[in-house]
């Protein structure tokens, strides 16, 4: 399985507009962060995790254009769905299905209803999208991948993360390759019922906003503690704000099996 981090930044992106902090003025490209999103690929199957407002630029930066088979949405906030209008038929997708919880589907139907009209009434050039409801713990098979939503809490807002496995794989790879991935963003806490769905995860992607307490997101220390409990072979932090130190300095403070992700990072 191949994981590509398309974006690793929080809702405002990094650099933040008009900020002159050390991270925002850094010339290290790892400190320039699009809004958080990822691409997961295996054996000809490709799924997109969230589709934020930087989607167009993320695809151009990728410099290759895989056919994306499905999009899974964690929640309805704009930094996770603001790029859906850029899903154009005949380029990467043709018809495509977005998988999301009912509350997210209802929000999208109100926000961008023109994307979901029947073909005979669809305005030329708009995305050709089907919406499919997901529920926590109910797995969805997309080609060679199995995606299982898990419940996490974004402050008081219930959202989902995803456990992603290769069909027929043995969970818990120890050689650095990915056979089982957990992808969680915007989490503040997780119900005790969900820990079983993180058993034998070999690669974890989880949010780490910055160092100060926040009402709806994990801090870096929270993310480290969470990663230790999961016990994955390797962990990558995403959804960072500009308050995270410049990459090299921040990375030096992490345990050896944990890393700050950056845009364009590829993990095989």
Image (spheres, grey):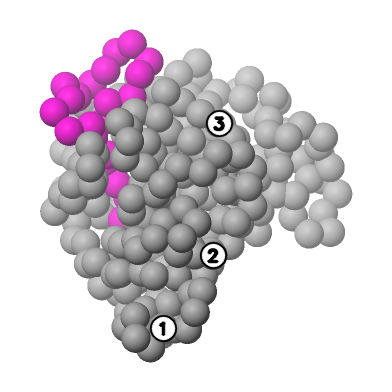
Q: Residue furthest bottom?
A: 121
Name the element at disc 3: loop
Q: Position of residue 151 (x, y in %)?
A: 25, 54
Residue visible at 39% across and 70% down in the picture: 128
Residue numbers of the magenta segment:
160-180
Q: Which residue is mark 3?
A: 265
Name the element at disc 2: helix
Q: Quadrant of the C terminus?
A: top left
Q: Earlier in the sequence, mark 2 or mark 1?
A: 2
Mark 1 neighbour class, 10 Å CA radius: few under 14, some 14 to 19, many 20 or more: some
Q: Which residue is mark 2?
A: 86
Q: Magenta stretch: dominant SS?
A: loop
Q: Earlier in the sequence, mark 3 or mark 2?
A: 2
Q: Which residue is mark 1?
A: 122
* Label 3 with label 2: CB-CB less than 8 Å: no
The residue nearer to you, when weighing 97 against 227, is 97
1 vs 3, front mark:
1
Name the element at disc 1: loop
State how far apart marks 1 and 3 are (Cα): 37 Å
């Amino acid at each position: 399985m191949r994981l590509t981090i398309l974006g690793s930044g929080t809702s405002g992106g990094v650099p933040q507009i008009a900020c002159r902090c050390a991270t925002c003025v850094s010339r290290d490209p790892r400190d320039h962060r699009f809004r958080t999103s990822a691409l997961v690929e295996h054996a000809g199957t490709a799924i997109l995790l969230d589709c934020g407002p930087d989607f167009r630029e993320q695809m151009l930066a990728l410099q290759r254009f895989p056919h994306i088979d499905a999009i899974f949405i964690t929640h309805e906030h704009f930094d996770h769905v603001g790029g859906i209008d850029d899903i154009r038929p005949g380029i990467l997708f043709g018809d495509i299905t977005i998988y999301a919880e009912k509350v997210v589907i209802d929000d999208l139907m109100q926000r961008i209803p023109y994307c979901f009209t029947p073909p005979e009434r669809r305005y030329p050039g708009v995305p050709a999208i089907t919406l499919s409801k997901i529920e926590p713990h109910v797995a969805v098979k997309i080609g060679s991948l199995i995606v299982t939503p898990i419940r996490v809490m974004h402050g008081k807002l219930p959202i989902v993360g995803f456990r992603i496995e290769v069909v027929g794989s043995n969970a818990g790879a120890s050689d650095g390759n990915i056979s089982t991935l957990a992808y969680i963003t915007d989490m503040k806490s997780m119900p005790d019922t969900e820990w079983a769905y993180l058993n034998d995860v070999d690669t974890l992607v989880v949010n780490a906003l910055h160092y100060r307490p926040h009402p709806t997101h994990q801090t870096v220390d929270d993310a480290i503690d969470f990663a230790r409990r999961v016990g994955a072979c390797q962990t990558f932090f995403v959804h960072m704000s500009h308050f995270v130190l410049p990459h090299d300095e921040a990375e030096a403070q992490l345990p050896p099996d944990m890393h700050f992700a950056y845009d364009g990072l590829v993990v095989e």
